[in-house]
Image: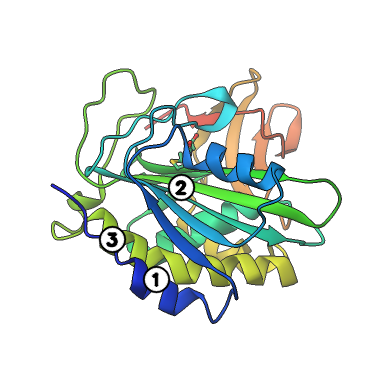
Amino acid sequence: MAVLWPAEAIWQAVEPLLPGFTVEVLPEIDSSNSELMRRARNGQLEPTLLVAERQTAGRGRLGRGWQSAAGESLTFSLGLPLAPADWAGLSLAVGVSVAESLHPRIRLKWPNDLWLDDRKLGGILIETAGAGPDRYAVVGIGLNIAPRPAEGLSTPPAALRELDAGLDAGNALLRISEPLVRTLQAFEQHGFAPFHARFQARDALRDRTVALSDGMAGTAHGVSETGSLLVHTAAGMQAISSSEVSVRPATP
Ligand code: BTN
């Protein structure tokens, strides 16, 4: 079913925070992140919320793809100039913001997954254009709205409709957008500190045995002040900050 996008309501809520802000809905694009990164490299640095009704080449972390179906998922990117003193923990802060906007049962799996009952509800892909502290940040978010097949996925999928049968991609986006902009502005001012305890409260890995893609294993002990995952291993406590590492619970 076609989604009615509340673009005007989102613009009304966000423009006072971000002058020059626009909302754009594209029926089809390779990837909303790729599009905003291309624009940024061409000098288009206005704050933009770009919704893709369909992505033909959606991208996830670690070079993975992101599959979604039109009408059954929410795929969008928010691009804006951002100059935090330290970028560490940004994807965690974004996860906190999205989870808090949607439902108390949503958990966060370090560094960028939204989980429901150990299944993947959504993911976050953050990219930046430019060098130095003043960059254009592209915050891409993909969320399953309706249940979807598990084939080909390393983590079984969950859907927002399991939590709220009346939800569609448009009203989910309306709930997420303004708090997300406030989150990015708070992160720019104060870094990860205001989000630390809020992440811990939703940490899906806390006190669980985890296996890392680099072969390490141990018990997850939350995140550090800068958003690194703390894992107690045979070699002692390790702080994992590398975005190249993936982690999963080794036990239920
Ligand atoms: C992940 O789980 O690895 C991150 C997935 C991020 C997917 C979103 S969908 C909107 C935006 N455009 C993309 O190509 N990717 C992000």
1 or 3: tag closer to the N-terminus: 3
Could you classify mark 1 by the number of other residues whose Cα lies within 10 Å: few (under 14), some (14-19), or many (20 or more)? many
Q: Position of residue 83 (x, y in %)?
A: 77, 61
* Residue at image location 72% in from the left, 64% down from the top: 191
What's the residue type where badge 3 is placed?
Trp
What's the residue type where badge 2 is placed?
Ile
Between 115 and 176, the one nearer to me in the picture = 176
* Residue at image location 27% in from the left, 40% down from the top: 158
Between 245 and 15, the one nearer to me in the picture = 15
Q: Is disc 2 placed on a helix, strand or loop? A: strand
Q: Is disc 3 placed on a helix, strand or loop? A: loop
Could you classify mark 2 by the number of other residues whose Cα lies within 10 Å: few (under 14), some (14-19), or many (20 or more)? many
- State the residue position of label 2: 141
Closer to the observer: label 2 or label 3?
3
Closer to the observer: label 2 or label 1?
1
Label placed on residue 5: 3
The answer as to whether callout 2 falls within 8 Å of ligand 1 is: yes
Horizontal side of residue 14 vs 242, given as left or right: left
Note whether 148 is above or below 197 in the view shown: above
What's the residue type where badge 1 is placed?
Ile
Q: Position of residue 64 (x, y in %)?
A: 50, 24
Note whether 142 is above or below 247 in the view shown: below
- State the residue position of label 1: 10
* Residue at image location 63% in from the left, 17% down from the top: 215
Distance of mark 2 from mark 1, alpha carbons?
16 Å
